[in-house]
Image: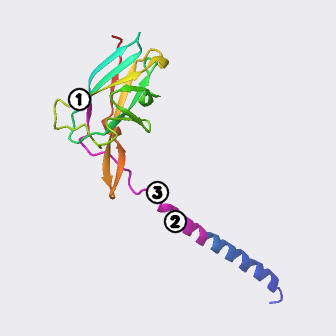
Amino acid sequence: MKNKKGLSVVIGYVLLIVISIVMSVIVYQWLRTYIPKEAVQCSDGTSLFIREISYNCTGQLLNITVKNNGKFSIDGYYIHVSNRTGENLSAIDLSHDVIYGGNFTSNSVIFSLFQDNILTPDQPRDVRLTSFNVSKYGQLYRVEIIPMRIEEIDNKNRTVVCSNAKVSSDLVCS
């Protein structure tokens, strides 16, 4: 018991380690509340059909007519094109190049600024034509469309991307 100084150093290290562990547990529990428990997914049965595509290579205009052939209403879509042949992933975002038939908001094309999920499946003649100016991208070879809808989750309207309902088509000059 003559060397009490060495014992107090060990107690200091033990206390330091215990305080560090307690602080890490507290921070972990606090950060866990910020991460959503489950990823928000689109309702099964949401589907969008590309009814017609008109691509004018010389005028650099792309017209796409879509129809809701699913079970749920759709608010809009994300649209990407590819200007390389054989490319499976279309990376060029066209949403900010809308000329007619839609509104650009947060990298997507929505059908109406005033009403959510306006493209309903119960009206067979309800289709939407959207025109895009694609002059700055050169020759395009492929288009991909991913539908989106507004769903109420925890009493809040949330934009839900329906990535499982993605449709794509090859582009041919007309």
Question: Relative to 75, does residue 25 appear above or below in the rendering?
Answer: below
- Secondary structure under the numbered disc 2 in the rendered image: helix
Give 94 or 141, whichever is nearer the viewer: 94
State yes or no: residue 27 in magenta.
yes
Gap in Å between the C-alphas at discs 2 and 1?
A: 47 Å
Residue named by callout 2:
30
- The N terminus sits in image quarter: bottom right
Q: Nearer the viewer, mark 3 or mark 1?
A: 1
Disc 3 on helix, strand or loop?
A: loop
C-alpha distance separating marks 3 and 2: 10 Å
Residue 84: horizontal and vertical position, in percent? Answer: 46, 18
Q: Which mark is residue 35?
A: 3
Question: In the image, what residue type sits under mark 3?
Answer: Ile
In this rendering, position of residue 34 left or right of residue 162:
right
Q: In the rendered image, which quarter contains the C terminus? A: top left
Task: From the viewer's side, name the closer residue of 159 and 169.
Answer: 159
Start and end of the magenta stretch? 22-48
Residue 72 sits in which quadrant?
A: top left
Q: Which residue is mark 1?
A: 127
